[in-house]
Image: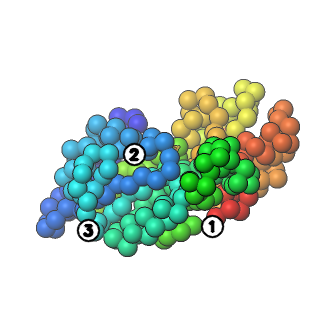
């Protein structure tokens, strides 16, 4: 995050702090994880510049990674990971019942993420591959985004979640405003930053069909977009595949590249 951005967010949080000081209590926040690598959760700990401001506004009431206490209810639940077992379904319903706002954090929670690649193969085959003869001891489901099971109020996309977007959603919630989610492609942000397109450097990129909001983070560092933020609402996948094929991938490779993060959206597995 640039110093300018950090300063902007810090100012916003400071204003929110003054507004909240007129209110009596801090927002009660809980953090939960389901199937994922916990990278998004760990990213919560990297808010060096804003951490003290954040703690002025929130009371963390439940977080498995940092404390033993459990809470009866919370204003905001930040939830990482996809739902992949019957136990996950039971637990997310409990969290939803206790939360005023539920925020899906990271690609696994928002779109199913890389876990959803398993949904493209028969589940019995996958279970046998992973658990062998003990597969009946480990019930599993297709890897689902939270929104396939419960109402999700806001998304923080990316793999891992982007801190700047998390802070935008967080700031909006503590100020009582509705966070706005972009529905244009990463290419728009990339062009606004005047980046050289990685296609001109012989690489391929999923920016044309990927939902913006990351400020074209990867292309800005000379890397291609993997599509970790999910697709825009009306992606032209056929054109995207054609572009990938025209730049050297086979049709099968192009399709697999698109499935990496977006298997649920492309193959339609949502429940
Ligand atoms: S979105 Fe990425 S970083 Fe976050 S839990 Fe899933 S795999 Fe890990
Ligand atoms: S680098 Fe990727 S995101 Fe940027 S303009 Fe090219 S295709 Fe779009």
Dot 2: what SS? helix
Q: Which mark is residue 41?
A: 2
Q: CA distance from mark 2 to mark 3?
A: 21 Å
Nearest to N terminus: mark 1 or mark 2:
2
On the image, numbered disc 3 is attached to which residue?
Answer: 72
The residue located at (68%, 47%) in the rendering is 128
Residue 43: percent from the left, percent from the top?
39, 41
Residue 199: percent from the left, percent from the top?
73, 33
Nearest to N terminus: mark 2 or mark 3:
2
Dot 1: what SS? loop
Is the distance from the Cβ of mark 3 to the nearest ligand 1 atom less than 8 Å? Answer: no
Q: Which mark is residue 214?
A: none
- Nearest the viewer among 96 and 4 is 96
201 over 152 or under it: above or below: above
Along the horizontal axis of the image, is 253 left or right of 185? right
Q: Quadrant of the C terminus?
A: bottom right
């Amino acid at each position: 995050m640039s110093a300018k951005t950090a300063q902007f967010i810090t100012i916003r949080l400071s204003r929110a702090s003054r507004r909240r000081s007129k209110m009596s209590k801090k927002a009660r926040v809980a953090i939960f994880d389901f199937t994922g690598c916990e990278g998004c959760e760990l990213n919560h700990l990297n808010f060096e510049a804003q951490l003290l401001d954040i703690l002025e506004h929130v009371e963390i009431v439940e977080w498995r990674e940092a404390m033993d206490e459990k809470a009866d209810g919370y204003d905001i639940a930040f939830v990482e990971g996809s739902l992949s077992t019957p136990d996950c379904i039971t637990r997310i319903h409990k969290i939803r019942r206790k939360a005023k706002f539920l925020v899906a954090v990271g690609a696994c929670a928002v779109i199913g993420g890389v876990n959803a690649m398993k949904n493209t193969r028969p589940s019995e085959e996958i279970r046998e591959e992973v658990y062998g003869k003990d597969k009946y001891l480990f019930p599993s489901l297709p890897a689902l985004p939270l929104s396939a099971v419960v109402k999700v109020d806001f998304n923080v996309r990316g793999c891992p979640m982007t801190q700047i977007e998390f802070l935008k959603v967080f700031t909006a919630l503590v100020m009582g405003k509705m966070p706005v989610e972009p529905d244009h492609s990463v290419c728009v942000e990339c062009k606004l930053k005047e980046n050289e397109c990685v296609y001109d450097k012989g690489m391929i990129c999923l920016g044309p069909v990927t939902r913006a909001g990351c400020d074209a983070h990867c292309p800005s560092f000379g890397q291609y977009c993997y599509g970790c933020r999910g697709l825009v609402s009306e992606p032209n996948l056929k054109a995207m595949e054609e572009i990938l094929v025209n730049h050297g991938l086979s049709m099968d490779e192009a399709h697999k590249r698109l499935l990496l993060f977006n298997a649920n959206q492309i193959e339609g597995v949502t429940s």
